[in-house]
Image: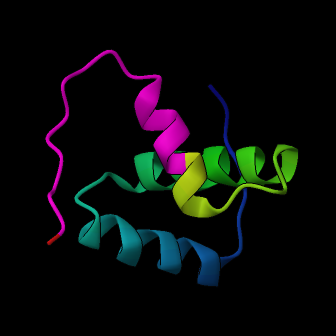
Amino acid sequence: MGIVKIDDALHEDVRRASAVMCRSINAQAEFWMKIGMLAETNPTLTFHEIIKTQLAAVPADLPRLSVA
C-alpha cells in the first residue's frame, strides 16, 4: 500500500463519484485506476465490454436485468 498524490480537483471528483457509487473514496479511485489500466491495455474494448469481462471473471451469481 502506498500514498498517491493527486490534484485537488481530481480528488473532489473522486469524492463526489464515490458518494454516488456508494464506494469509499479509496475504492472509487482504485476502480478508476483499474478500469483506466484495462482500457489502455485493451484499446479496442468499450467501457461496457471491460465491465462485462470483469463481471464474467467473478465467481458469483449476479442478478441480470431483462430489457424489454
Residue shown at 50% from the left, 48% from the top: 51
- For the residue pair 43 and 13, the one nearer the viewer reads as 43
Percent position (x, y) of residue 36?
Answer: 71, 55
Residue shown at 84% from the left, 56% from the top: 43
- Does the magenta run of residues contain 64? yes
Q: Quadrant of the N terminus?
A: top right
- For the residue pair 4 and 50, the one nearer the viewer reads as 50
Question: In the figure, residue 9 lies in which quadrant?
Answer: bottom right
Q: On the picture, is 4 further left or further right than 68? A: right
Q: Quadrant of the C terminus?
A: bottom left
Asked if residue 1 is positioned above or below residue 9 in the image, the reply reads above
Asked if residue 25 is positioned above or below residue 50 in the image, the reply reads below
User: In the orientation shown, which residue stands out farthest toward the bottom?
Assistant: 9
User: In the orientation shown, which residue stands out farthest toward the front?
Assistant: 68
Asked if residue 26 is positioned above or below residue 57 in the image, the reply reads below
Residue shown at 28% from the left, 64% from the top: 21
Residue shown at 73% from the left, 44% from the top: 38
Q: Main secondary structure of the magenta part?
A: loop
Percent position (x, y) of residue 22?
Answer: 22, 59
- Does the magenta run of residues contain 61? yes
Q: On the picture, is 32 further left or further right than 3? A: left
- Colour logic: rainbow
Specify the segment rendered in magenta: 51-67
